[in-house]
Image (tube, grey):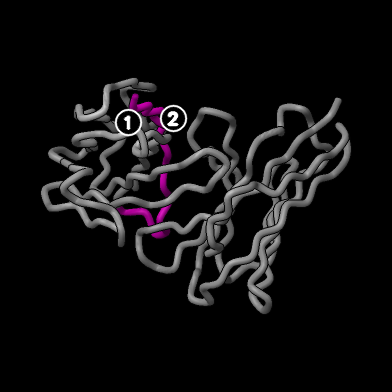
Amino acid sequence: GESVGLHLPTLSVQEGDNSIINCAYSNSASDYFIWYKQESGKGPQFIIDIRSNMDKRQGQRVTVLLNKTVKHLSLQIAATQPGDSAVYFCAENSGYSTLTFGKGTMLLVSP
Amino acid sequence: GAVVSQHPSWVICKSGTSVKIECRSLDFQATTMFWYRQFPKQSLMLMATSNEGSKATYEQGVEKDKFLINHASLTLSTLTVTSAHPEDSSFYICSALIAGRTYNEQFFGPGTRLTVL
């Protein structure tokens, strides 16, 4: 997983735009990936997951893309809404029970 | 389904005191629970893995004598911060693993904000 930084990268978008949040992972043995949304003062909330045998998975307004060649994960949010404003974390699982979290990206949606 | 609760949601204590945080799986049994710590504007860092009926496994750099974990039942794990100091102030989050799932899906609690004065 990524190292933890002291400052969160921020993505600012307008309401209605599509948002793309990126994540790099380091463990090529990871076989399960999850995107979480975390609102201020709350625990992480599951958004979508993807197994390593897939390269794309779609949910409601969200799509996750996995590129194992370059160890890259992205979360696409369609028609972003103010309620989507939060910090988004990717997490990887390498076969054991534990998850390794990326450093997170803050998404700010302006009306 | 798959709801995890934490108690308390926030706590303020004096330096040197001990604080216990509870993590409960409300509608499922969890043989494994995890404790994370999160500092402001940072990611979740795994502190320890708690297995029901056995000793917790601590991550490197986490003091097991300071952060006592007890997982006495399939629905409850507790984290006790002993002799808390201001640097222990943080957001503590637990998660629970549903037994028997093919992939390791964790369900997170709402977190506990600890402030040590």
**Chain containing the residue with disc 1:** B
Q: Quadrant of the C terminus of chain B?
A: top left
Q: Amino acid at mark 2?
A: Pro
**Chain containing the residue with disc 2:** B
Q: Nearer the viewer, residue A106 or A58?
A: A106
Q: Amino acid at mark 1?
A: Asp
Does residue B111 show up magenta in the picture?
Answer: yes
- Disc 2 target residue: B110
Does residue B65 show up magenta in the picture?
Answer: no
Looking at the image, residue B50 sits to the left or right of residue A14; the answer is left
Which range is magenta? Answer: B100-117
Q: Is residue B55 above or below residue B20?
A: below
Q: Is residue A104 above or below residue A38?
A: below
Q: Residue at x 13, y 39 (%)?
A: B72
Helix, strand, or loop for circle 1? loop
Q: What is the x, y in percent for residue A96? A: 36, 65
Q: Residue at x 20, y 40 (%)?
A: B74
Q: What is the x, y in percent for residue A13? A: 84, 39
Q: What is the x, y in percent for residue A86? A: 66, 35
Q: What is the x, y in percent for residue B34? A: 32, 47
CB contact under 8 Å: marks 1 and 2: no
Q: Residue at x 57, y 41 (%)?
A: B41
Q: Is residue A51 visible?
A: yes
Q: Residue at x 53, y 56 (%)?
A: A4
Q: Kindly report the distance in space between the C-alpha atoms of the residues bearing marks 1 and 2.
A: 16 Å
Q: How many C-alpha atoms fall within 10 Å of the one at disc 1: few (<14), some, or many (≥20)?
A: few
- Disc 1 target residue: B27
Q: Is residue B12 above or below residue A94?
A: above
